Amino acid sequence: MPVHKPLVWLPACHRHLDLSDPGGYTVLADRYAAAVCELGLQPVLFPMAGAADIPDLLPLVDGVLLTGSPSNVEATHYGGTRLETDLIDPRRDALTMNLVRAALAGGTPLFGVCRGLQEMNVALGGTLYQRVHAEQGLMDHREPEGEDLEKQFAERHEVLLAPGSAFAQWAGGTRAQVNSLHGQGIRKLGDRLVAEAHAPDGLVEGVRVVHASAFAFGVQWHPEWHHARHPFYARTLEAFAQACREHGRRRLS
């Protein structure tokens, strides 16, 4: 049997990039797809997929990577009220809220990055701070405006990692430096989520899904950014890639 690259589903975002084209565009930041390729995996998109398509599409892939995005999870999904400043993506929300639960139920490796972590949390019943920087006692976790990408994605703060956790194993210790480019963050943890990485202000930055039958983690930072330069990022992504390879072998056997 020929060897195929494991397939990783990256849910797309939806934008109105051209005001003369009301149909909108399906978009994905290249850095996520590039990182998946560099891991020896094949990123796949299902541009018009909705929740009803998940039972047909999920069995075709070997992993799900929930990417970051400029948009926020709409507050109505966790009992909040949408802020006027919110950039939202209802089509993505409608897909990912269901995709998280389906991936966990079916044992498909799942990794959430930034917005993806927040999607995991909300899909499992958690809530979010809509503006972390406005909360007393919490830091401003947003990237510096007006700077080039190297400065925006530079390491910004430390994370404290639970001893004995997979995060500590990937970092080679219980402390690591990470980037920080988010305005929202976890307020109340969702069901089955365990916080295993925290920012210095106590904000949850990394989670594990309890009793998951496959890789199921989420992080608030961006390990896809130049991961080859950062051993912690690289080991985290490689653990996800290995889980996808194992799932692929089972799927195709």
Image: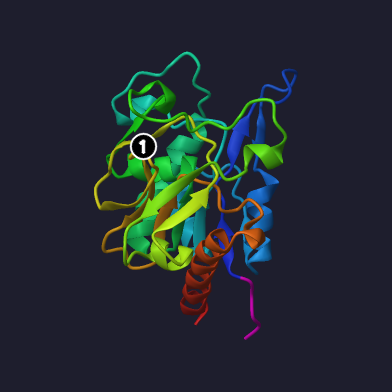
The residue wearing badge 1 is 201
Give the residue displayed 69% in from the left and 25% down from the top: 146
Q: Nearer the viewer, residue 223 or 147?
A: 147
- Horizontally, residue 213 falls left or right of residue 222, namely left
Q: Specify whether residue 62 is in view.
A: no
Residue at the left extreme?
191
Give the vertical position of 142 relative to 230 (above or below).
Answer: above
Q: Report the amino acid beneath label 1.
A: Asp
Q: Position of residue 52 (x, y in %)?
A: 43, 45
Q: Position of residue 195 (x, y in %)?
A: 31, 50
Dominant secondary structure of the magenta stretch?
loop
Give the vertical position of 48 relative to 102 (above or below).
Answer: above
Residue at the bottom extreme?
1
Q: Secondary structure at mark 1?
A: loop
- Horizontally, residue 69 falls left or right of residue 126, namely right
Q: Nearer the viewer, residue 188 or 82?
A: 188
> Is residue 4 found inside the magenta-colored segment of the image?
yes
Q: Nearer the viewer, residue 31 or 167?
A: 167
Q: Quadrant of the N terminus?
A: bottom right
Give the residue displayed 35% in from the left and 23% down from the top: 135
Q: Position of residue 212 (x, y in %)?
A: 31, 63
Give the vertical position of 174 relative to 30 (above or below).
Answer: below
Give the residue displayed 53% in from the left and 24% down from the top: 87
Question: Which region is colored magenta?
Answer: 1-5
Q: Nearer the viewer, residue 176 or 114?
A: 176
Residue at the top extreme?
84
Write down the quadrant of residue 152 in the picture. top right
